Image: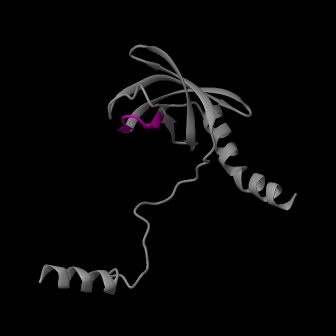
Amino acid sequence: MAKQWFTTLWKRGSSDGGRRRPLRPQRQRIERYFECNWLSDWGEEQTRVSSISPTGCFVDSRFTVPPSGAHVQELSVALPSGCITVEGTVLTARPGIGFAVRFTEIDTATRARLIALVAARPQERYRASSA
């Protein structure tokens, strides 16, 4: 009986008629690797950021991952326009993978640089494909 129910449900598909809704609103971000240094409980760690936006980033760190809710005192990211240093709170920690950080202490000049970096993303992609 359970097999018949599961097969019928699987063949029917989703209840929303095949339309998928995003789970959460998508924020403007750029997914590219940037070198970074951050200060952990054991000292300075050298790793990379794989995704960055004006409000936060994802730090790839296989060995040292702070727990969710932890405060990252110093996170330095090497952008094409120069290095930025910010503070943040760990939103999501994934041991062996990395952690998501929401920026808490960020000045207006740094935020403007991040907004410009993300805003330049479509032009970079367009130029690369038209060349």
**How is the protein colored in the picture?**
one colour
Residue drawn at x 39%, y 85% as measured from the top left: 17
Q: Name the image quarter holding the N terminus.
A: bottom left
Look at the image and tell me in which quarter the C terminus lies.
bottom right
Left or right: residue 68 compared with residue 42: left
Quarter where residue 84 is shown: top right
Q: From what the image shows, is residue 69 above or below residue 39? A: below
Q: Nearer the viewer, residue 2 or 122?
A: 2
Q: Residue furthest right?
A: 131
Q: Residue visible at 60% across and 47% down?
A: 31
Quarter of image, res 65: top left
Q: Give the side of residue 11 with respect to residue 38, left or right.
A: left
Rendering coords of residue 47 (x, y %): 55, 27
Of residue 118 and residue 36, the one placed in the foreground of this image is 36
Rendering coords of residue 55 (x, y %) = 52, 42
Does residue 84 appear left or right of residue 56 in this picture?
Answer: right
**Residue 32 is a magenta residue:** no
Image location of residue 20, percent across then percent down: 43, 74
The residue lying toward the viewer, choosing from 38 and 65, is 65
For the stretch drawn in magenta, the main secondary structure is strand
Q: Residue at x 62, y 38 (%)?
A: 33
Start-end of magenta stretch: 93-103
Please, is residue 14 above or below residue 106 in the view? below
* Residue 91 in picture, x, y percent from top left: 38, 39
Count all numbered tags in the image, as a single digit: 0
Residue 31 vertical position relative to residue 15 in the rendered view, above or below:
above
Instruction: Using the image, determine if residue 87 lies above or below residue 24.
Output: above
**Quarter-of-image position of residue 4:** bottom left
Q: Is residue 16 left or right of residue 52?
A: left
Residue at the limit of the structure toward the left, as seen here: 1
